[in-house]
Image (cartoon, rainbow, N blue to C red):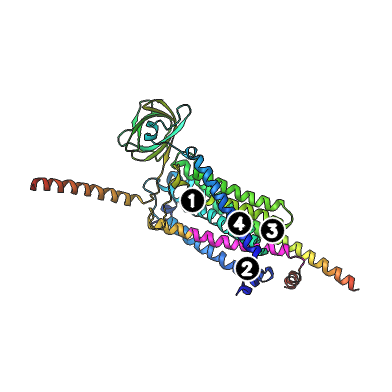
Amino acid sequence: MKINIFKYAAPATFYPLAGKMIPWFMWAAALLGIAGLYYSFFEAPLADYQQGQSYKIMFIHVPTAWMSMFIYVVMAMWAASGLIWNTRLSAMMAKSLAPTGALFAFLALVTGAVWGKPTWGTWWVWDARLTSELILFFLYIGFIALGAAIEDPRRAAKATGLLALVGIVNVPIIYFSVIWWSTLHQPPSLKLNESTMGVEMLISILLMTLCFWSYTIGVALSRVRTEILQRESKTDWVAALVQEGEKK
Amino acid sequence: MKRRYKKIAFIVGGVAGIGIAAALVLNAFQSNMVFFFSPTQVMANEAPVDRPFRLGGLVKEGSIERQDDGLTVNFIVTDHAVDMPVVFVGILPDLFREGQGVVTQGRLESSNLFRAEEVLAKHDETYMPPEVAEALEKGQQAKAENDSKSTTTTLIAN
Amino acid sequence: MSIAEALDMGRYSVYVWSCYGLTLFCIIVELVWLKQHRKMVWQRVCRMVRMTKRQKDEAQV
């Protein structure tokens, strides 16, 4: 069993496997996205009783905010496994997730600001939730910049891995900030056992989240493939791959 | 194998250490992490006197008074224990209404008047279509009427 | 529900549509960027493989 796992963790085996998986995740993302948008606009209620139609921003804002936190946790876990087992693939996985995580953090911040203007009356306030989400965005940027600044991939993986692990403390702070402190941002509408939200709204949010999930996996796998190609460019299997590709 | 366990212990210990450090720092800054003070806290002199701070609570039902100049608004922010009169000159956000959460920034002009420079509406975590909200309200009214009826009938019966 | 009704955001149209538009734009940019980067790396690897092959052939001769 153990041998099997490490066999798939070898870049030469993983490269074609990932290549087969990417289209599946991308198609799933496209279908889920269409379903999510359909539900958001045609099935979910036209307006919220307080916010009116501006509440439709929530269907982008909530899933992107979740994704930004979730991707960070997954990224830190890959980084940790890379540090522990010294597997090349783990560090590449962490590196491939960072740009998409940063994108979702950025979208969560911007859509939140655009929602905040009409509802709260301001684009931005320095409350605990907004500030900690901004710190998350900067952690992603720091992770990407640090990785790009160090040329030796092994040293880069170590440094960025440590940064990812230090930053993980921020994720529970983001999540619980609205419960621990008085903030302008409202507490979560979805809890483990109940939700203070209409069912159609909930389905829209879940569909959009699944869409972003699939998209993230597809994009990250694609990035890993490119990274493998780059790092293994001197190996025989890549040479064979190139020749095969050129024959076609 | 042993080196690997050492590494795992190092990573787990490191993250736990940073977590504890963060918790201590956040705890130390607890008072600065507060985005707003409630009227009760202001009454208990917990809010700063010398600099602007934020006052948060609900806009008391029936307390909004618009002045003739069209910009000045008087209203009361309450946390159901203490009422704090607020005066504000400017444009209010869409969600500002009676019974709704609000966060205002400004200073205390006297012990019972808060002059706000900025008013932000605070939203709660409830999302529902207007029809549901209406139905809920009707249901509550009906229930209240029923309750009062039943009390009167019991009174009569007695 | 008619399409016009569902897509009309009242006075919030600028806010709502800018959010959806920005998200779509960002996703497209990421995908295009990914594709171009991959193309660039592939071409570089191809060049390298060809070069090492030529070197090997010359060494054999």
Q: Amino acid at mark 1?
A: Tyr
The x and y percentages for residue B2 are 65, 65
Single out the residue that lies furthest toward the right. C61
Q: Cα distance, mark 4 to mark 1?
A: 23 Å
Task: Check if residue A213 falls in the magenta segment.
Answer: yes
Q: Residues within 10 Å of mark 1 (few under 14, many from 20)?
A: some
Q: Amino acid at mark 2?
A: Ala
Q: Nearer the viewer, residue C23 or A230?
A: A230
Label 3–label 4 contact, CB within 8 A: no
The x and y percentages for residue B19 are 54, 50
Q: What label does residue C37 carry, if any?
A: 3
Q: Residues within 10 Å of mark 4 (few under 14, many from 20)?
A: some
Q: Cα distance, mark 2 to mark 4?
A: 29 Å
Marks 1 and 2 on same chain: yes
Q: Residue at 48% of width from left, 46% of height from top? A: A177
Task: Check if residue B43 falls in the magenta segment.
Answer: no
Q: Cα distance, mark 3 to mark 4?
A: 34 Å
Residue at disc 1, secondary structure: helix
Q: Which residues are magenta?
A: A208-234
Q: What label does residue A18 carry, if any?
A: 2
Q: Which residue is mark 1?
A: A175
Please, which chain is the residue tagged with disc 1 on? A
Residue at disc 2, secondary structure: helix
A50 vs C59, left or right, is: left
Q: What label does residue B11 carry, if any?
A: 4
**Which mark is in front, 4 or 1?**
4
Please, which chain is the residue tagged with disc 2 on? A
Label whose residue precedes the other's in the sequence (1 or 2): 2
State which quarter of the image contains the C terminus of chain C: bottom right
